[in-house]
Amino acid sequence: MIKVLRVDDRLLHGQVAQSWTSFYRIDKIFIINDEIVNDEFSKITLNLAKPKNVELLFFELDNCKDALLEALINDDRVMVIVENFYDVWIVHEILPTIHSINIGGYRNKADQDTVALNRFVILRKKDIEICKKLLNKGIKLEIRQIPAEKEQLIDLSDTEYEQ
């Protein structure tokens, strides 16, 4: 079963690996990222961040559908991590039964074409468009670095976030 779908521009790091996998008792982490799949050094580095009892698997965006659908029905507790909002949109199209997306960190350079939701999440116009589509589907978008933090819900109907 898929326990959490997360957007994090750093993908997997110690904070995520320890807190989220413990909180959800995760068995497997799926990292869906086209670049990482073919980068052995990055895969080795990411493997160092995961807990010993958790399996880490890498998938290209175009080749993740079967693994994701299998994860929905088997007993393994799975965390899915993507690097950006475009990828989370594609993954959600495969997994429309997921009703909540966790946003860990998404640090774009703050400038006139971005909206800073907090110090960890800075959205570009194209990200805001995808977030609005997800929100219109009834998906909860929550910003939290670790499970113990209070979630910050993204609500783009607020004029503060409009562009």
Image: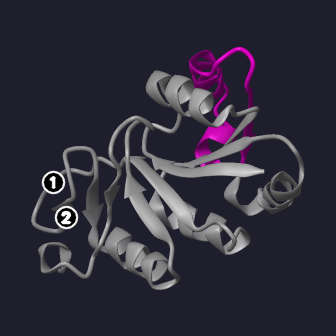
Q: Which type of secondary structure does the marked residue at label 2 adopt?
A: strand
Q: Are marks 1 and 2 in contact (CB under 8 Å)?
A: yes
The quadrant of the rendering that contains the C terminus is bottom left
| Residue pictured at 35% horizontal, 73% vertical | 126
The answer to whether residue 89 is above or below residue 150 is: below
**Magenta-colored stretch includes residue 113:** no
Residue 11 horizontal/vertical position (percent): 51, 39
Classify residue 29 by image quadrant. top right
Q: Residue 1 in the image: x percent, y percent?
A: 78, 51
| Count of numbered tags | 2
Q: Name the spot of residue 53 as percent of width and height, x first.
A: 75, 18
Query: In this picture, is 63 found above or below 49?
Result: below
**Which region is colored magenta?**
31-59
Q: CA distance from mark 1 to mark 2?
A: 6 Å
For label 1, the residue is 110
In the displayed structure image, the side of residue 118 where residue 99 appears, left or right: right
- The three-letter amino acid code for the residue at tag 2 is Thr
The residue at 62%/39% (across/down) is 36
Residue 114, labelled with which disc? 2
Left or right, 60 with respect to 75, comes to: left
109 vs 6, nearest the viewer: 6
